[in-house]
Image: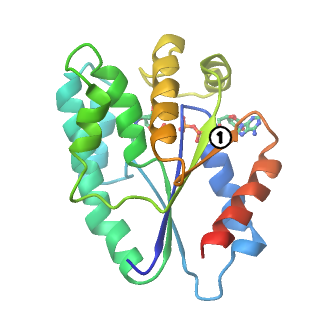
Amino acid sequence: MPGKLITFEGIDGSGKSTMLSLLKENKDLKKPDDGIVFTREPTQNTLTGKAVYAAIENDVDPMAELFLFMADHAAHISETVRPNLSAGKIVISDRYSDSRCAYQGATLDKIIPNALDFIKNIHVGWTIVPDLTFLFDLTPEDSVERCKNRGEKTKFEKIEFLTQVRENFMTIAKTEPGRFVILDAKRPAEENEKIIVEKILSIL
Ligand SMILES: Nc1ncnc2c1ncn2[C@@H]1O[C@H](COP(=O)(O)OP(=O)(O)OP(=O)(O)O)[C@@H](O)[C@H]1O
Ligand SMILES: Cc1cn([C@H]2C[C@H](O)[C@@H](COP(=O)(O)O)O2)c(=O)[nH]c1=O
C-alpha cells in the first residue's frame, strides 16, 4: 500500500479523541495536498456502526458482538481505509483491530480458550495491519474517573473489566514492539502530541 496507516488505541477515556483534535490543527502535520484522513472504529452513521452501538448498549451475546465489530471493521477497510491508502494518503484511525483483541479478548475470556489469540487470528489474511500504533496507557481508576463526567456510558467502563482490557493491550504491544509506541496518558496532551508528531514524520 502506498499510504500509511496509523492507529490510536487505549482504554476508555485515555485521551485518543482529544489527541486527534490536536493533530487536526497541528501545523507540522499539515500537508499541502490534504493527504491525511481521520477516521474511527466503530464507524459513525453507518449500518454496521449502528449495529455495533446497538449491541454495546444492550446485553448481546459476546460472540455475536465480536462478529458485529468484525463486520464494521470489514466495511471500514473496504469503504475508507483501503481506498485512501491506495490513493497514497495517511489514514489515522481512532481505534482499530487492537481494540477488538483487547476488549473482546476480555468479554470472551472464560467463554472460549485463548480468546485474544482467536480474535487476532480471525483478522489474518484480509485486514490491513497498521504501520504505527500509539497506545495511550491509563489506569482503569483514572479512566473511570475521566469517564464519570461524560453523559453517555458504555458497559465497558468498569474497573475490573478495564484492568483486563489494559493488560490485553500491553500483551499485544509486547508481541509487536516495532509497531507500538506506548504513551503515558496522564502526561499533558501537548507533550504527547510532540512525541506523536515526531514519530509520524519519521515514518513518512
Ligand atoms: N492528557 C490528558 N490529561 C488529562 N485529561 C485528559 C487528557 N487527555 C484527555 N483528557 C480528558 O479525558 C477525558 C477523555 O478524553 P477523550 O475523550 O479524548 O478519551 P478517548 O480515549 O477518546 O475516550 P473513548 O475511547 O472512551 O471515546 C476528556 O474529559 C478529556 O478532556
Ligand atoms: C473498535 C472497538 C471498540 N470497542 C469498545 C471501546 C469503547 O468502549 C466502545 C465504543 O467506542 P468509542 O470510541 O467509545 O465510541 O466500544 C470494542 O469493544 N471493540 C472494538 O473493536
The C terminus is located in which quarter? bottom right
Please tell me in which quadrant of the rendered image residue 186 appears.
top right
Instruction: Tell me where residue 155 appears, x and y as whole percent.
Output: 41, 20
Q: Secondary structure at mark 1?
A: loop
Residue at 60% across / 71% down in the picture? 203
The N terminus is located in which quarter? bottom left
Instruction: Tell me where residue 130 appears, x and y as whole percent.
Output: 44, 59
Asked whether mark 1 lies closer than 8 Å to ligand 1, one says yes
Please tell me in which quadrant of the rendered image residue 83 appears.
bottom left
Q: What residue does disc 1 label?
A: 15
Is residue 200 left or right of 9 when viewed as pictured?
right
Instruction: Tell me where residue 49 appears, x and y as whole percent.
Output: 31, 47
Instruction: Tell me where residue 138 appears, x and y as whole percent.
Output: 65, 29
Residue at 54% across / 13% down in the picture? 159
Is residue 88 left or right of 197 when viewed as pictured?
left
Badge 1 amino acid: Gly
Decide: is 58 above or below 1. above
Colour convention of the picture = rainbow
Ligand 2 position by quadrant: top left
Please tell me in which quadrant of the rendered image residue 36 appears.
bottom right
